[in-house]
Structures are given as C-alpha cells and as structure tokens.
Amino acid sequence: MSISVEEKYKELINNLRKLGKVAIAFSGGVDSTFLVYAAREALGNNVIAFTVNSPYIPQWEVDEAREWIQSIGVDHEVIGVDIPENIKNNPSDRCYLCKKQIFSLLISEMKKHNINYLLEGTNKDDEGDYRPGMKALDELKVLSPLRQVGFAKEEIRQMSKKHELPTWNKPAYACLLTRIPYDTTITEEELRRIEAGEKKLFALGFEGARLRSHGNVARVELQQHHFETIMEGETKQLVVEKLKSVGYQFVCVDLEGYRMGSYNQTISKNVQR
C-alpha cells in the first residue's frame, strides 16, 4: 500500500525530530532546499547548512543558496574547496572520490559545532542512475532523509510548491564536472567557459539546458520542448554566436535532448555495477 505525499512529509518531520540537531549539505537545489526547510520546521534553530564553493560549482548557484537561506534564518557556512587532486583527470569514479573528500570535510566542520548527523538531499529517483557518490555517502554514514522516506523528485517539487519554496520549479542541476568527458584533464578555465556558455543559454530562455564540452565543440542538450524554439527566427544563430563568444568553434544540438548523466553511457556496464 503506497503512502501519500503528505504522509511522507509527516514521516520526514518525525525522523528529523529524532535527530535533535543536524548539519545539512546545502547546494541550493530543489532537494537540499526542501530538506533544509523541513529540518527548520522540525528542529528550529538546531540546524546548520554547509555550502561548498568550488571551481566546479557555478557562482550563481552559491549566491542563490546564500540569499535564500538568509531569508529563513538558518545558520549557514560557505566552505571554499579546490578541485581535489585525485579527480583532476575526471575519472569515471570521480563522483565517489569527490564526495568522499568533500563530505569528510563537512563532517569535520560539523563536529566543530558538536553535531552528530550530516544530512544530504538524495531522493528516491537518484537510485536509478550511475551514482558512485552514493557509495561514499554510505561509507561515511551521511544520512539521506528524503530517500529514506521514499520521496521522488516530482513529489519534492509538489511539496516545495505547497510551501512556497522558490526552487519548486527550478531545473535539475549538477556540478560542472558532469559537462566534461571522463578521463579528460579538468582546468578552471574550462569550467568557467562552460559556466559562461550555460548562462548565455539560460538568458536566451533555454532553462535546464546542458553544455557538454568536447574541446572546441559545444554539444547542447535541450529540454524536449525547446527543440522547436531553437529553430525559430534568429534564435539558432544567436545560440551559435553566444557560444562562439566564450571560445567554442563549433556548436551542435544533441538530438536526444537532455538526459541525466549522458556521459555515463560511455562507461561499461561492469563499471556501473
């Protein structure tokens, strides 16, 4: 027998209350924003949020996270992190290596505040993709309360809208490392080029687009409803001009459109298991 979204929310609140005091890894995305909101309701001032500021995190996302969390009065720390040395060649287990290092750092910060529980916003839908980072979370005993009660992404959006959270319809986003092929050297210059290119796509109305970077080629993944739009009038030429202005020589649109973790198709099934 399935339980309603409202029942899941009640269970989430009850589970959070049992923890007493928590720290939350807060990116400013749909899931972590909803989790912070629920924790605030359950625990009041016994919540602190940590936001990582790194070259592979767009600055606009850090700024949005900071602005919203200040508006609800939750303690917040922005922690600067360089690109970990062991992921600078973007290995296929990058997410595991990165999360292991980043969340170990957050646990150290958490302990300075005499807190015993670190939470993050993985939801039930995240179980379906290649997510080596989840292994790191399990090893470090980081809690995923939304996944624990079975919250799916659309249910989180539904409840976020009900509680008037600004992220309820925010497109899914992932760190900029996911825009670069595996086994490719990562540079801050390249990350900034991708960030600039995606900002230009967003400004043209292509929310939720991804710019997958292949050297001098920008492969653009669009939401399905944007395929007709990009071919209208001068839009196509504008996209080409904007992306060439940040350093790409060639621009192409991926006919399969946006799909989560598209570079994971290049990894053998044995590795994904």
Image (cartoon, grey):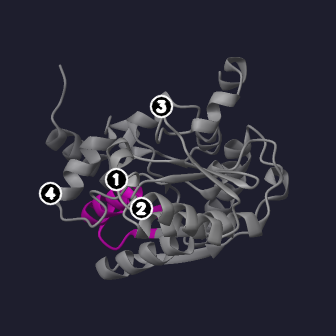
69 lies left or right of 102:
left
Tag 4's secondary structure? Answer: helix
Mark 4 nearby-residue class (10 Å; few <14, some 14–19, many ≥20): few
Question: For this rendering, which residue is in front, 137 or 177?
Answer: 177
Q: Is residue 54 above or below residue 34?
A: below
Q: Are marks 1 and 4 in contact (CB under 8 Å)?
A: no
* Amino acid at dot 2: Thr
Q: Which numbered disc, 4 or 2, marks the residue that appears first in the sequence?
A: 4
Q: Indicate whether residue 167 is drawn in magenta.
A: no
Q: Is residue 141 visible?
A: yes
Q: Earlier in the sequence, mark 1 or mark 4?
A: 4
User: In this figure, which residue is indicated by the disc labeled 4?
Assistant: 162
Q: Report whether 89 appears left or right of 12.
A: right
Q: Residue at x 45, y 70 (%)?
A: 48
What amino acid type is highlighted by mark number 3? Glu
Q: What is the number of the mark on residue 127?
A: 3
Q: Which residue is mark 2?
A: 235
